[in-house]
Image (cartoon, rainbow, N blue to C red):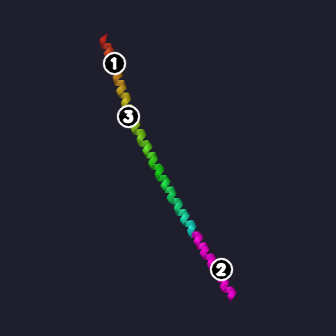
Amino acid sequence: MSYNMENTTEEQILLSESEIDEEEKRLRAEDSRKQLKAILITLAIILTSFLTFTYFFFNYIEEKAEEYKKQQEQEVQQVEAQR
């Protein structure tokens, strides 16, 4: 009788350890998913910021190029008018 009780207690301990291991695995997996989500959100924010900066930077460059081109045309017209 004592052997059966001991065996049952060991089985219960093994089952509870197994349940604890499963719970730890589940929690680790959940934590990993949260970390991955945070990393992806961070990368999305960085990429969006970079693309926004690039868009406005190239628009600025384009405007300055147009201004420079107009200025050059005006200088050419002034030189031709002086002849």
Locate the N terminus by quadrant.
Answer: bottom right
Please state which of the two labelled residues, at mark 1 or mark 2, is closer to the viewer.
2
Locate the C terminus by quadrant.
Answer: top left
The residue wearing badge 1 is: 75
Answer few, some or many: residues within 10 Å of disc 1's Cα (few below 14, many 20 plus, some between 14 and 19).
few
Label 1 secondary element: helix
Which residue shows up at 44% across the image and 43% down it? 50
Answer few, some or many: residues within 10 Å of disc 3's Cα (few below 14, many 20 plus, some between 14 and 19).
few
**Was residue 57 drawn as part of the magenta stretch in this picture?**
no
- Quarter of the image holding residue 75? top left
Sooner in the amino-acid sequence: mark 1 or mark 2: 2
Label 3 secondary element: helix
- Quarter of the image holding residue 77? top left
CA–CA distance in space, label 1 to label 3: 23 Å
**Was residue 8 drawn as part of the magenta stretch in this picture?**
yes
CA–CA distance in space, label 3 to label 2: 74 Å
* Main secondary structure of the magenta stretch: helix
The residue wearing badge 2 is: 10
Q: Which mark is residue 6?
A: none
Residue 22 against residue 36 in the figure, above or below = below
Sooner in the amino-acid sequence: mark 3 or mark 2: 2
The picture places residue 51, in percent across and down from the top left corner, at: 43, 42
Q: Which mark is residue 60?
A: 3
Residue 32 against residue 58 in the figure, above or below = below
